[in-house]
Image: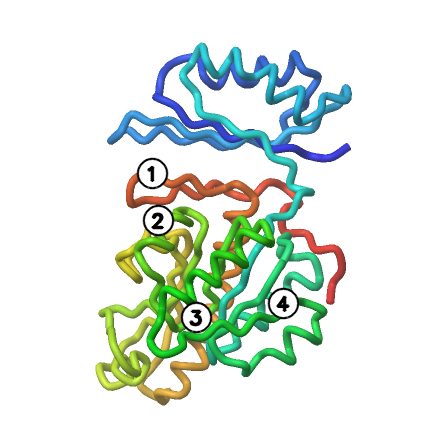
């Protein structure tokens, strides 16, 4: 028997957890784990429940039957089967560390996604992608016509049925139109410094300022470039004895880990967007297990 997932979003009030748990019990389902959050500032309630249908209830039957409970409590809800892997487009430019990491995790089953295409504005990683038996698409901006390139990208997204775009160090700014169209379905990774450095050579700037912590941030993409709702972050310590290239190498590893964790949270239905914030629930038992070790 396999796990299914139910996510719920509604106004915070009494009886929601009881109604949901009672419904699942009546449908012959055993709850494996459940996480919930009351946002006291907005009076919104969020819940993610992982469960096993022990008497043969199907996803379709559960969805239809739960509508009465949802109507009674004003819920927005979705049922998911984690076995249905999210169709994903990976985008990369000339820094390949995140792409390599994603491909490895995908290959061993540690990152449960269905990569339907890899897109790049360069051809540096075309052979790597093709060697992994994945389709590679070279989409570059010709004669400054950015709209034509994005139209080509959206045609690809629609033809593949992609549900998620991952910017694995894709060094082009996406238009407002594309960001709005794919709202909540584009994940980006970028460096994070304390203090923050923008522009060219951020690691060199950090080195020159004697930064002691460097890191990475994965977030949903909005029109505000690197200021979208944050999904995942991490840091690593550096010292005065390390060079600017050392900072780059250390940051590279952190970026890979943070991006993969953000993708995992998204495709496991553990993220809930609320305004400029992202609620990230913990993973269910066994969610990180891979199909093989290497």
User: Label 4 belongs to which residue?
Assistant: 103
Circle nearer the N terminus (4, 3): 4
Residue 157 in percent (x, y) is at: 53, 55
Apparent side of residue 186 relative to residue 82 in the rendered image (left or right): left
Mark 3 and mark 1: span between their CA atoms?
Answer: 26 Å
Residue, disc 1: 274
Left or right of residue 20: residue 131: right
Q: CA distance from mark 2 to mark 3?
A: 18 Å
2 or 1: tag closer to the N-terminus: 2
Q: Disc 2 vs disc 1: which is toward the camera? A: 2
- Kindly indicate whether the residue at mark 3 contacts the one at mark 2 (C-beta within 8 angstroms): no
Q: Residues within 10 Å of mark 4 (few under 14, many from 20)?
A: some
Label 2 SS: helix
The answer to whether residue 279 is left or right of residue 284 is left
Which numbered disc flags the more N-terminal residue, 4 or 2?
A: 4
Q: Given this view, does label 2 or label 3 mark the residue nearer the observer?
A: 2
How many neighbours does mark 2 have within 10 angstroms: few (below 14), some (14-19), or many (20 or more)?
A: some
Instruction: Say the numbered circle drawn on residue 180.
Output: 2
Q: Residues within 10 Å of mark 1 (few under 14, many from 20)?
A: few
Q: Nearer the viewer, residue 196 or 106?
A: 106
Mark 1 lies on a secondary structure that is strand
Numbered mark located on residue 170 in the image: 3
């Amino acid at each position: 028997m396999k796990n299914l997932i139910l996510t719920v979003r509604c106004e915070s009030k009494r009886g929601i957890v009881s109604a949901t748990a009672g419904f699942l019990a009546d449908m012959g389902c055993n709850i494996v784990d459940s996480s919930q959050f009351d946002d006291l500032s907005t009076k919104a309630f969020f819940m993610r429940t992982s469960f096993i249908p022990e008497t043969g209830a199907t996803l379709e039957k559960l969805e239809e039957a739960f509508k009465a409970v949802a109507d009674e409590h004003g819920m927005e809800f979705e049922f998911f089967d984690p076995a249905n892997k999210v169709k994903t487009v990976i985008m990369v430019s000339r820094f390949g560390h995140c792409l390599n990491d994603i491909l490895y995790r995908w290959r061993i089953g540690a990152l449960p996604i269905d990569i339907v295409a890899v897109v790049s504005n360069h051809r540096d990683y075309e052979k790597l992608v093709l060697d992994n038996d994945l389709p590679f698409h070279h989409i570059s901006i010709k004669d400054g016509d950015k709209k034509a390139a994005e139209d080509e990208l959206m045609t690809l997204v629609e033809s593949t049925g992609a549900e998620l775009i991952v910017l694995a160090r894709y060094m082009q700014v996406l238009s407002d139109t594309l960001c709005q169209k794919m709202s909540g379905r584009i994940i980006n990774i970028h460096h994070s410094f304390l203090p923050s450095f923008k522009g060219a050579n951020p690691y060199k700037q950090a080195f020159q300022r004697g930064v002691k912590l460097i890191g990475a941030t994965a977030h949903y993409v909005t029109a505000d470039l690197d200021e979208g709702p944050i999904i995942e972050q991490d840091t690593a310590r550096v010292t005065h004895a390390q060079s600017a290239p050392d900072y780059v190498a250390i940051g590279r590893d952190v970026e890979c880990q943070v991006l993969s964790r953000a993708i995992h949270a998204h495709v496991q239905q553990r993220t809930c967007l609320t305004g400029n914030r992202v609620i990230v629930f913990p993973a269910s038992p066994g969610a990180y297990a891979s199909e093989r070790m290497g």
